[in-house]
Amino acid sequence: MNAYLSSVIENVKKKHSDEPEFVQTVEEVFSSLEPVIERHPEYEKADLLNRMVEPERMFTFRVVWMDDAGKYHTNIGYRCQFNGALGPYKGGLRFQANVNPSIIKFLGFEQTFKDSLTGLPIGGAKGGSDFDPAGKSDAEVMRFCQSFMQALYRYIGPDVDVPAGDMGVGGREIGYLFGEYRRLKGAFENGVLTGKGFSFGGSLIRPEATGYGAVYYLQNVLAHEGEDIKGKTIAAAGFGNVTWGICQKAMQLGAKVVTLSGPDGYIYDPDGVATQEKVDYLLEMRASGRNKVKDYADKFGVEFHAGEKPWGIKVDVIMPSAMQNDVHMEQAKQIAANGVKYYVEVANMPTTNDALKFLMEQPGMVVAPSKAVNAGGVAVSALEMSQNSERLFWTAEEVDAKLHGIMKTIYTMSVEAAEKYGLGYNLVAGANIAGFLRVADAMMAQGIF
């Protein structure tokens, strides 16, 4: 490996030894960059890589809220404004008990390159809290969101930082956050948050956008192999907005998602989540707050596998769509043994580095990375920002058409970047290189700071 590149990775490992998720994603991105760094000695001269792995700003704050019984609770809030070279910081807020600085930092780093791939003027950020909305009343969630925004509002704005939703943060939470921001600022700056309700500045198809975009990306991959999506079977994970969008778009295009998962295990539906009743039931499952995928098995009389992951099922396409590090080497070997041809990451960093490397080495297997595949969500968020800024309204068909075009561009950019640097048809390396170069060029043009 290039000496400069190697030294940066080793430096990250030493400085961030207590942040394993962050170290993992830096290694995954930078492992693709050797031919780029070799051709651009100016990057080393400006110490670009060591600057790029440190957030421009990261801060924490306490969030105190009262439950319905009148008891006070204190959680930690985070915002990592990782890189603003391309535009206002942009990235979601995650409310989940396991949120910690390493997860927020890795998500912010990954978001920087994902946002770059969209071609839109947005930088990378991420934030959230170790608060878990599951099991909380609407009033408790509202009070938490209001307290969270009281600490965050000074550091965000339409031209500064535009948060969105993520795991644990849906339309309800975004509505409460925006309402408190509006009260504190005394102004209707509806471009400050995306994922808003349609009645106050939200974009049509935003909840479905990540899942829709992932399926559109898959279509490009299949077309390269001379195949069509119709008739394909897909193993997905989770049952939130992303998986719901995948199920819905796959159904529309004649494919079927045959697995869903949750904290309690996974279901296998050989007929697929391929009727409107089944797709709509995912919304009921999420709204119930139970967070149990077994509810689907009970409702539709299909197999439920307690405490297991769905990656041993033989399908045409694997689409990990739940959370980070969901697929380890053990599951990767199962996937390869089943002869799966298409491994398309959807969740942020759903595969451990060793498992990803193993899958990429399998003859005939096509591997696509999450930073490219799941960029549809942030792309539509940026479109929402544009609509807010210009007081526009785009129909669902117009937004969907723009999303379709953006995903094709991301795919094409990834293919061309890998080929340009002599790596062949390598979608993982191509996405890393294409995302990196746009950020790198902007940072170099703006000087050293």
Image (cartoon, rainbow, N blue to C red):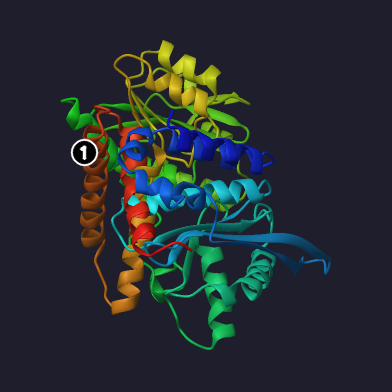
**Point 33% across, 34% down: residue:** 35
Q: Nearer the viewer, residue 8 or 238?
A: 8
Report the residue that reaches farthest toward the bottom: 186
Count the labels in the image.
1
Residue 106 appears in the rendering:
yes
Q: In this image, 208 relative to 143: left or right?
A: left
The image quadrant that residue 316 belongs to is top left
Q: Residues within 10 Å of mark 1 (few under 14, many from 20)?
A: many
The image quadrant that residue 136 belongs to is bottom right
Q: Nearer the viewer, residue 417 or 378?
A: 417
**Point 28% across, 56% down: residue:** 119
Residue 431: x percent and y percent? Answer: 33, 40
Residue 389: x percent and y percent? Answer: 33, 77
Residue at mark 1? 416
Q: In this image, 226 relative to 283: left or right?
A: left
**Point 55% across, 85% down: residue:** 185
The image quadrant that residue 396 belongs to is bottom left
Q: In this image, 363 relative to 269: left or right?
A: left
Amino acid of disc 1: Glu
Report the residue that reaches farthest toward the left: 226
User: Eyeballing the image, is 309 above or below 76?
Assistant: above
Which type of secondary structure does the marked residue at label 1 adopt? helix
Q: In this image, 35 relative to 262: left or right?
A: left
User: Eyeballing the image, is 33 above or below 136?
Assistant: above
Report the residue that reaches farthest toward the front: 45
Quadrant where the N terminus sits is top left
Residue 226: x percent and y percent? Answer: 15, 25
**Point 63% across, 46% down: residue:** 102
Residue 47: x percent and y percent? Answer: 46, 50
Residue 16 appears in the rendering:
no
